[in-house]
Image: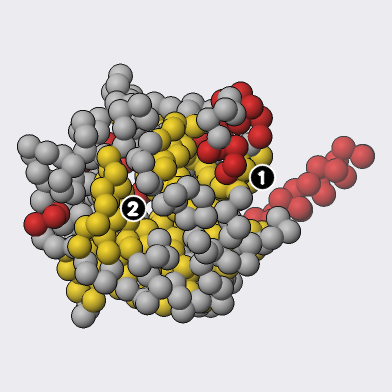
Amino acid sequence: MKSRFFASTLAISVAAASQTSFATEPTSLSASAPTDKTIGQLDQVFAFHDAMPTGVTVTDNGRIFVNYPKWGDDVSFTVGEIREGQVFPYPDAAFNREDIKDPAKALISVQSVVADGKGRVWLLDTAAPGFAAPKAGGAKLVAVDLATNKVVKTLVFPATVMLASTYVNDMRFDFRVGKEGTVYVTDSSISGPGAIIVMDIASGKAMRRLSGAKSTSPDPDFIPVVEGQPALITKGLDGKPKTLTVASDGIALSADGKTLYFCPLSSRHLYSVPTALLRNPNVSEVQLAAAVKDLGEKGASDGLEADANGAVYAGDYEHNSIRKRLADGSWQTIVHDPRVLWPDTLSIGPDGYLYFIANQLQRQAGFHAGKDLRDKPYSLLRVKIDAAPAPTH
């Protein structure tokens, strides 16, 4: 009797479930269904319809400069100034044409532009189009006087800090140390050791620090996920798919100049190191590595910046976001928007806005079996932060 009862009950339950499933027909998702909420009020400062930019800097008087590395797009000039609704080659068209006979005399492929707070804009030339080995004597820092738009200084990276795999990426300046100041540069190699290059501006002498250290190296377990898919997938030497690994990339200097923040692109961690130790040649690499602090996860970043109040800003390219680390070490998300497709370089302007490039880097053809998925225009965006840039002097 019990088995008949249970069988009858089960049959009734199955029948009821069947009736319920047939009674409930699937419908199209309503446009009013809950969605991911955006954070931050974004302004589009400029739309790029040609080559893909990576870097931006905003000067004390509001001039805006951008750069285009030679990664495969048709780049007619590698540094430009945005004015009158257009981008003009800077400092002029001639200086943007490579000098085959002397790689130090003109620009080759610029990865970063930074206004130094002292009336100049600096251009960081990788001399490595397409991430090839840098051309001998071509990797350099070029200072352009903003009042005259003339080149006033060129610093070629000495061979002692340049490897065949070196890709100089971003830079920060401190004019409180050294006769003419000091510049810190990240080596974001994709095939060799990452590093922080420390250069004395007056003499041009440079040191390669934290070369191959954990803090400047890609996280071996890191696989980026962008737009819901594993990203930066390329072909290895064996022809098989692999994730592109990029070493130390983003860099920021604290307002007092005492702390350098940096991160590999292929990682979610933020690191810091005392600049006094970084500059001191008597501090061994072992001692220096021990002084580096792992400040924990911040998201995956392709750009960092610091403000005058002690905050650090970091792009989060996996989540279409910009994050802010407060002086107490806590984090806030200040931008989250589906239009922030790969936030690249960050720059704080004199107007209290944080400017950044959104360039869809992850959609390049090299990561999609030769098919370019980028959807122009690329954007220069900004968000109000009500803070001034970290001082350099």
Query: Disc 2 marks which amino acid?
Result: Ser
Residue 360 in picture, x, y percent from top left: 34, 55
- Tag count: 2
Tell me which label, 1 or 2, sits earlier in the chain. Answer: 2
User: Residue 46 occupies which quadrant of the picture?
Assistant: bottom left
Say which residue appears at 44% left-offset and 32% top-offset: 207
Residue 281 in picture, x, y percent from top left: 53, 30
Q: Is residue 53 left or right of residue 295?
A: left
Query: Disc 1 marks which amino acid?
Result: Leu
Query: Residue 93 got which mark?
Result: none
Whether residue 301 is visible = no
Whether residue 307 is visible = yes
User: Residue 189 occupies which quadrant of the picture?
Assistant: top left
Residue 126 in picture, x, y percent from top left: 28, 42
Disc 2 packing (10 Å; few <14; some 14–19; many ≥20)? many
According to the picture, the residue beneath numbered tag 1 turns out to be: 295
Say which of marks 1 and 2 sits in front: 2
Among all residues in the image, which is located at the extreme front?
Answer: 179
Q: Is residue 278 left or right of residue 166?
A: right
Q: Is residue 41 above or below residue 35?
A: below
Query: Residue 112 got which mark?
Result: 2
User: Residue 122 occupies which quadrant of the picture?
Assistant: bottom left
Say which residue appears at 47% left-offset and 68% top-offset: 348
Q: CA distance from mark 1 to mark 2?
A: 25 Å
The residue nearer to you, when weighing 308 against 224, is 308
